[in-house]
């Protein structure tokens, strides 16, 4: 849908205000004034401040979630292809893809990770963790049934490790790493976590 010049002005000023102060402390009055419009003009596009925030981040957030689901589907495909030993390699490949996606929408993810308290996006990382744990446990169950895993991991430990992993990934955004720095960091992070998972699960 084409965005009007007025709407784009509101989005631009809103993004700047949210990045500067975070959602909770951002002033809708200031956004409207700086954009040069009345509150009536603003409400013609967005019912409240939360809707403006969502308009800024929803496409990027939903896009990463959908790509993440596709990556999980690709892991299930390894079972039918009898190539489950490539799980770690595939995970690292997709992780690097995700990082590049995040950097393509860096400001949007900066808003989500650092400025979203008070919005539904404040639990974004947690929701990704829940999605990953749920789908991955189904994957591990299938692998165990086929004799492809010799080890095991409890649900509680699985959740804690995954939470630590996702939090570490998004530290690239928190610390304003360059794309190049983030990629090198992620490669090392993947080696560390993959070694731990291999030690616990012992893929065959």
Image (tube, grey):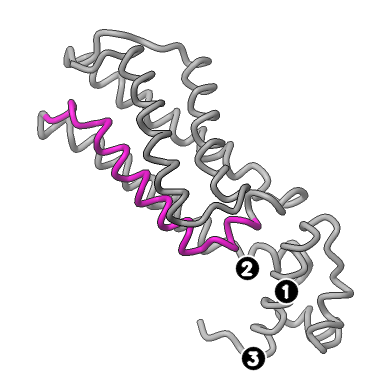
The residue that label 2 is drawn on is 55
Residue range highlighted in magenta: 83-111
User: Dot 1 lies on which element?
Assistant: loop
- Upstream in the sequence, badge 3 or badge 2? 3
The residue that label 3 is drawn on is 5
- Give percent across and percent down for residue 204: 17, 16
User: Dot 3 lies on which element?
Assistant: helix
The quarter holding residue 202 reads top left
- Give percent across and percent down for residue 146: 17, 16
Q: Which mark is residue 46?
A: 1
- Upstream in the sequence, badge 3 or badge 1? 3
The answer to whether 184 appears left or right of 174 in the picture is left
**93 in magenta:** yes
The answer to whether 195 appears left or right of 117 in the picture is left
Q: Which mark is residue 30?
A: none
What's the residue at 30%, 8% (across, down)? 151
Name the residue nearer the viewer: 204 or 7: 204
**180 in magenta:** no
Label 3 and label 1: CA atoms lie apart by: 15 Å
User: Dot 2 lies on which element?
Assistant: helix
Q: Residue furthest right?
A: 29
Mark 1 closeness class: few <14, some 14–19, many ≥20 residues within 10 Å? some
What's the residue at 81%, 75% (across, down)? 31
Identify the main secondary structure in magenta.
helix
- Upstream in the sequence, badge 1 or badge 2? 1
The answer to whether 58 appears left or right of 97 in the picture is right
- Between circles 1 and 2, the one closer to the viewer is 2
């Amino acid at each position: 849908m084409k965005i009007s010049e007025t709407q784009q002005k509101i989005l631009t000023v809103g993004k700047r205000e949210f990045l500067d102060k975070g959602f909770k402390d951002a002033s809708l009055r200031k956004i409207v004034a700086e954009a040069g419009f009345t509150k009536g003009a603003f409400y013609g596009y967005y019912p409240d401040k939360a809707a403006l925030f969502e308009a800024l981040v929803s496409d990027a957030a939903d896009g990463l979630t959908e790509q993440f689901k596709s990556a999980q589907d690709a892991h299930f495909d390894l079972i039918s292809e009898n190539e489950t030993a490539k799980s770690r390699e595939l995970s690292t490949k997709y992780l690097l893809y995700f990082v590049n996606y995040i950097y393509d929408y860096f400001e949007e993810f900066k808003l989500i990770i650092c400025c979203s308290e008070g919005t539904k996006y404040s639990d974004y990382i947690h929701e990704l963790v829940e999605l990953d744990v749920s789908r991955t446990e189904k994957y591990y169950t299938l692998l165990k049934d086929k004799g492809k895993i010799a080890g095991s991991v409890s649900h509680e430990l699985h959740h804690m490790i995954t939470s630590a992993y996702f939090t570490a990934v998004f530290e690239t955004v928190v610390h304003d790493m360059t794309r190049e720095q983030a990629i090198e960091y992620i490669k090392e992070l993947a080696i560390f976590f993959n070694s731990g998972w291999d030690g616990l699960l012992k893929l065959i």
